[in-house]
Image (cartoon, rainbow, N blue to C red):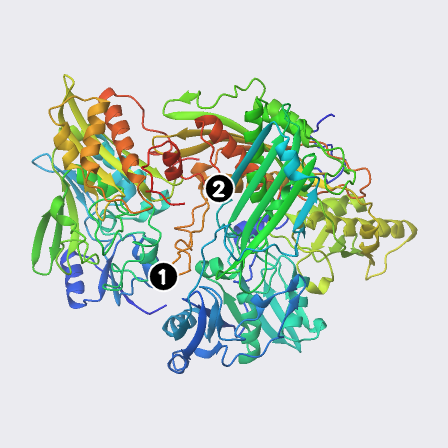
Amino acid sequence: MTTATGTTRATGAVGTARTRIEGLDKVTGAARYAGEVPFAGLAHGWVVVSTVARGRVRSIDDAPVREMPGVLAVLHHGNAPRLQEGFVGTLGPDPVAEIFQRDRVPHVGWPVALVVAETSEQAREAAETLVVEYDTEPHDVAFDPRHPDRYTPEATVQGPAVTEKGDLEAELAASTVVVDELYTTPEQHHNAMEPHAAMARWDGGRLEVVDTSQGTMMTATDLAALFQLDPESVHVRSEHIGGGFGSKGWLRAHNVLAVMAATVVGRPVRVVLTRRQVFSLTGYRSPTAQRVRLGADAEGRLRALDHDGVSLTSTLTEFVEATGGYGRAMYEAEALRTANHVVRLDVPTPTFMRAPGEAPGSFALESALDELAEKCGLDPIELRARNEPAVGPVTGLPFADRELLTCFREGARRFNWEGRDPRPGVRRDGRWLLGTGTAAATFPAGVAPSTAAVTAEADGTFTVRINAADVGTGARTALAQVAADALGADLDRIRVRIGDSDLGQAWLSGGSMGTRSWSWAVMAAAAELRERLALSAELPPEGITVRSDTTEAVGALAERERHSYGAQFAEVAVDVNTGEVRVRRMLGIFAAGRIVNPLTARSQFVGGMTWGLSMALHEEAIRDRVSGGLANGDLAGYHFAANADVPVIEADWVHDPDPDDPVGIKGIGEIGIVGAAAAIANAVRHATGVRHRALPIRPDRVLAAAGAVPEGTTRA
Amino acid sequence: MREFGYQRAHDVAGAVALLDAAPDARFLGGGTNLVDLMKTGVERPALLVDVTELPLDGIGVTADGALHIGATVTNSDLAAHPEVRRRYPALAQAVLAGASGQLRNMATVGGNLLQRTRCGYFADTARPCNKRTPGSGCSALDGIHRNHAILGASAHCVATHPSDMAVALAAFDAVVSYETASGTGELAWADFYLPVGDTPHRETALPPGALITGITLPPAPVAAHSRYRKIRERASYAFAIGSAAAALDVRDGVVHEVRLAFGAVASRPWRAREAERALTGGPATAAAFAAAADAELAAAEPLPDNGYKVPLLRNVTVVLLTELATGTGPVERTEPTEGAKR
């Protein structure tokens, strides 16, 4: 297998590094986000959230607040318009969207009122003055994998809750080497730079919403259902998005309340969440506890693989952080079991967060494989090579392509992995112990039907219309590159219109499926347009437009195991006297199909790896058991990696062709974070001889692991 | 946001007169802490008196060889001043270990001394906190307190003082000068911060309405041989989970003079006088350093989740004093030059 790292052979625009089309607008501030698009007569809503974790709103004393300067309305469950009861959104039933419909308080930070005023400052002052009284009930927010109420869901969004193959217990009993450990990850938050915001107004009988949405069609469809409107009458725009990571697509307080308030006061209303409100109202990654059991023969071949994960959800609805799914198509084993369980607590509702399931799931399984390699006396890469499956271990389907070992080989070469001394705790640089670690990564390569329209304009330019979302990753630019090649036109002749529900149905920016799904539709329309243009002598004034719909083509794709792969490498320095861990370098080599824009693709890989570093060492939302709220629900308390924590991070990719696939593009939004935390934890083990199975690897945990902290003085 | 008044003072007498006339007023320095607290509703002053243009921005050596630092000197200017770097290097290092370049360009010396704790419960107005709302209770005692105090705390409050700068000042016996409507005054460092007791909301011995006008560092030759070490949960832009400022003068293998202060362990910078006593006149060995740290930390009363601070401070003490005694272990790049270049 040859590699094409860093040298994707480009014959057109695809494969060449391009800065973002809207880059200048963004860095000069000309690009407007949902919270700052100006509107005449705009009123401002400020959300009031609950301070108790479970109970009922007894009273809301809104009369004095209505008299405050500039106040236009105070909305709450006692006076709010009725929404569709039992609302079912695009992704299923979603009681979280049913705001102000009942007095029940399901968690700290639940919306209990909205104050609408002439200015944001007036709304805020009135909101902070509003007295809300509660009848409280005892709450339970403590995540415990052995919680008596834990249950196994019927399914998860990402597939069945449980898969089983072979006789697990028999294979474990027959194994020469066994690893049986519990791995935990804490509650983590997306913290997109742009907080959730929406503006809504009624204009000529249509509801117009400017939102920050990863999928305007989903937002429009769901708003129509929730407010019982004609779907045609709802128009959602989302031109620029300051990061989403899975948290921006749902109907949540910002967009629901903007629409509700605009309807009540008959004026445009904007609702912007505060950072603290983002922590409780827009979803997060559940904490997880994962038991991994591996059994292998003396040569390191897996006889048994059991990955059993527990996560939490709210009392409102079920969302499962499906950690158990990570290992379903990764390694060959005689017996293979993966399972996901969940426990309902009085906490906000978790949601998709970058690599849902895979990010925490890979930490557990890829750490466990490292433990197995050490027990077997095998190099961790060799262990993985010995357990390469020929077909999908659970499905039996052939792999469309699987370049995991290519990634490892290329990564090992560039990281100087060969000749690595496997002994832990023997390398030192001054006060620092040094170590290296590696881990695999994978993410499904999915695709979904989309529609697109491509117009050959009379002036010789082209307009591409597709309801894609650019969450900041450069989707607009990537689609222009794809269109340029499909049309055989220069990039500067392509105009791309995205982020508008009036453009029609297209997949949202999620599941690492955006670029692939949208490109397919754009290529289909462009190819047909090119044929039409070849036959046309002259263009009519309105140009020629060709529309595509990939429903049929996507449905005809042969069933295969389709995934992206990666190999993560990290070198760390650990001072066991102070507990400090510093990552010195990281390398990620990925097999992710055809890379459209090396510049922005590298940013996404490096961004994901940086988040993996942050997950390994820093990120942790800490829930206060007494109040039920977060003890660190702001950016002063919720630490993610600072610049000084992030070393030189290299990301590159190998040639990864899928002969069956007409597009050849895979998603790259999520795989960068997968496996990164495990590579760092494995490196910490190599540096210190101590295995950390609980994230983040904090100084106090490193000190405790070094035996420095007296027993009983550090909980959890 | 509640409306508030704003006035810029042009001389010290005018500034203190303004505050004297409006009890619900606060002095505004760089605003790097006060404005944040106003945004979250923890502080709701009726009037801000901006003191940043007062003529208190000088650093100079006094006739008796002390170093006087004006209250409105920015953290950046303090850390960059040649006399500070030469005579009190731990002070320059401590300042540079705090916050970010942008914040240090705004933050003032006077404001740094008076910054409030970063206890998450103090910042969350929905939760009980004796420091914010006297008598409401302490949420941290039975709550999240991994980064809270192990020394000198009380059943009423276990918050820590967040300043790095003040830890070095504690080691160097700084004297705080202030002015009120009725005249000027001075507070010795040991008297400046009050014990927690049952009044955690009362943090300093400054009289009501007092404006800090400057600090004075007495001459201390030992301070020229000093260092600051800060441990935090990420490499930059985080408050300490444990820190130490140390100065050491070893003659013929014997500790002639030593200064040691801890940060992030108490409601105020913690001068480690027990450790200093244990070391003075004794051998400058790692074993002696460890024993001295143990002597200081014997009084520690860790909570269920912050026991790690005891070995952390012990280890940092040993490493720091060993480095000073042996002249090894260069100060690391990420600490003093943070923000300057990345």
Between residue A539 and residue A1, name the one nearer to us: A1
Looking at the rendered image, the quarter that the N terminus of chain A falls into is top right
Q: Which mark is residue B238?
A: none
- Report in which chain the residue with disc 1 lies: B
Q: Is residue A321 visible?
A: no
Apparent side of residue A284 relative to residue A512 in the rendered image (left or right):
left
**Residue drawn 61% across the image and 54% down it:** A152
Q: Are marks 2 and 1 on the same chain?
A: no
Is mark 2 in CB contact (under 8 Å) with mark 1?
no
Alpha carbon distance from label 2 to label 1: 28 Å
Report the residue marked by disc 2: A614
Q: Position of residue A532 (x, y in %)?
A: 89, 52
Relative to A265, residue A152 above or below: above
Secondary structure at badge 2 equals helix
Apparent side of residue A440 relative to residue A50 in the rendered image (left or right):
right
Apparent side of residue A391 relative to residue A201 in the rendered image (left or right):
right
Between residue A227 and residue B180, name the one nearer to us: A227
Report the residue marked by disc 1: B39
Pair 2/1: label in front: 2
Q: Quadrant of residue B253?
A: top left
Amino acid carrying mark 1 in the image: Lys
Q: Is residue B234 visible?
A: yes
- Report in which chain the residue with disc 2 lies: A
Q: Position of residue A590 (x, y in %)?
A: 65, 35
Amino acid carrying mark 2 in the image: Ser
Relative to B296, residue B115 above or below: below
